[in-house]
Image (cartoon, rainbow, N blue to C red):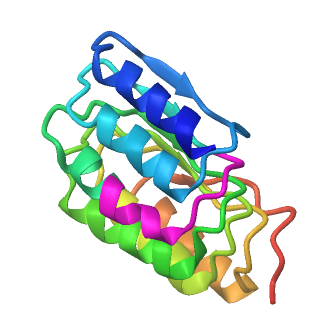
Amino acid sequence: GEENSLILAAALKNNQCLKVLRLRDSALDENGSVAVIQALTGQEALEELDISGNDITGNLSHALGPFLLDEKCYLKTLFMDDNEIGSAGATDLAHILLKSACPRLERLSLCCCEITAAGGIALAVAVSRIAAFSLLNLDGNEICSSGVELISEKLLSCNKTLGDMEDNDED
């Protein structure tokens, strides 16, 4: 819950050598996840962050912005699967990535996040501009077949890869 997230955030502020943080299914709510992300801002060593399977919505972008825009952000992998990010949240994240000083980002995973083609395309455009980027995972979302095709084409044109879309719900 929120109280435990605040305790974790306080501990993270003082840890400058953390390389991997996996908080999958850790009952982070919106306020707790914001506190954790704010505590990670400025951490130069963090390369992988997994906040999948929590109660996170697209509103997290106001905390992710400063984190990803920080010139000290050396994040390579960001997992946000199984959250209620939605297309609006995905589009907000894409706008942040377009402005980001996060040049080492290689993998972004937003599987099962209620994202439609519009959000997926916005993400593809954003990550295609990151030189180190290689893999975008969007499986289990609500992306129509023409949207999948557009996303895949955009990524392939920049030598990037779209992960398998086997469980995509084309509604």
Query: Is 113 on the left-hand or right-hand side of 98?
Result: right
Residue at image position (38%, 64%) is 61
Q: Residue 141: horizontal and vertical position, in percent?
A: 73, 71
Instruction: State whether residue 128 appears in this view.
Output: no
Residue 45, magenta (yes or no): no
Q: Residue 4: horizontal and vertical position, in percent?
A: 57, 33
Image vertical order of residue 24 relative to residue 59, above or below? above
Query: Is 26 on the left-hand or right-hand side of 67?
Result: right
Question: Which one is nearer the viewer's eye here, 109 or 51?
Answer: 51
Image vertical order of residue 24 relative to residue 46, above or below? below
- Residue 47: name its quadrant: top left
Range of the magenta residues? 52-63
Residue at image position (27%, 45%) is 67
Q: Quadrant of the N terminus?
A: top right
Q: Quadrant of the C terminus?
A: bottom right
- Residue 114: name its quadrant: bottom right
Residue at image position (39%, 19%) is 11
Instruction: State whether residue 5 appears in this view.
Output: yes
